[in-house]
Image: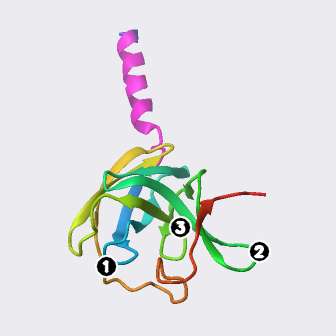
Amino acid sequence: MTFKMILAGAAALAFAAPAFADIIITDAYARAAMPGAKTGAAFMVIGNDGAEADRLIDARSDIAARVELHTHIANSEGVMQMVHVEEGFEIPAEGQHLLARGGDHVMFMGLSQSLVQGESVKVTLVFEKAGEIEVEIPVDLERKPMHQGMGHGEGQGMMHGTKNDS
């Protein structure tokens, strides 16, 4: 009888334990810089309904030779540079993180296929706590940026680099 009580107590604790992170991906889309380009990007809203923050630490896809998490920062001359963010992006508890043109995004380099309007691409997002989440991201080459000034790959003087915290 004691063993059954311990087992029941353990089961109750297991169900009562808070989830690390309940990740929800919304408004996702992918696009290439221009038709036939060897680079592209994916944008989305990453929501976290969990009680603990999580972190997007990697992304993978078969459509590109390299897939990295990127952002834009201004260099000393004020020119915006696209840089790899090795530490990833924090997704706050009961909050969200926006991956958008001109800001944080998933970067595809060395595309092995063209991104075609209306099709979709498979991307695996890797989180510290939630683990791997595979998403089908629709290609939307016609979507306009949410704000003007820093469109992704639209002749804005974007450069690639590696984030340097110094």
Instruction: Please name the residue that numbered disc 1 is placed on.
Output: 141
Give me the residue at 38% from left, 18% from top.
7
Give me the residue at 21% from left, 68% from top.
119
Give yes or no for residue 18 being in the magenta stretch: yes
Mark 2 element type = loop
Q: Label 1 sits on what residue type?
A: Leu
- Closer-to-camera residue (132/130): 132
Tell me the crowding category of disc 1: few under 14, some 14 to 19, or many 20 or more residues within 10 angstroms, Cα based: some
Give me the residue at 31% from left, 77% from top.
35
Distance between the Cα atoms at labels 3 and 2? 20 Å
Distance between the Cα atoms at labels 2 and 1? 32 Å
Residue 22, horizontal then vertical, whole percent = 42, 51
Residues rendered magenta in the picture: 3-21
Quadrant of the image containing the N terminus = top left
Q: Label 2 sits on what residue type?
A: Ser
Name the side, left or right, on which 80 lies relative to 109.
right
Residue 145, horizontal then vertical, whole percent = 44, 84
First-in-chain label (1 vs 3): 3
> Which residue appears farthest toward the left when viewing the image?
118
- Closer-to-camera residue (91/153): 153
Tell me the crowding category of disc 2: few under 14, some 14 to 19, or many 20 or more residues within 10 angstroms, Cα based: few
User: Can you tell which of label 2 and label 1 is closer to the viewer?
Assistant: 2
Instruction: Please name the residue that numbered disc 2 is placed on.
Output: 76
- Closer-to-camera residue (13/68): 68
Instruction: Please name the residue that numbered disc 3 is placed on.
Output: 104
**As displayed, is residue 99 above or below residue 84?**
below
> Which residue appears farthest toward the bottom when viewing the image?
148
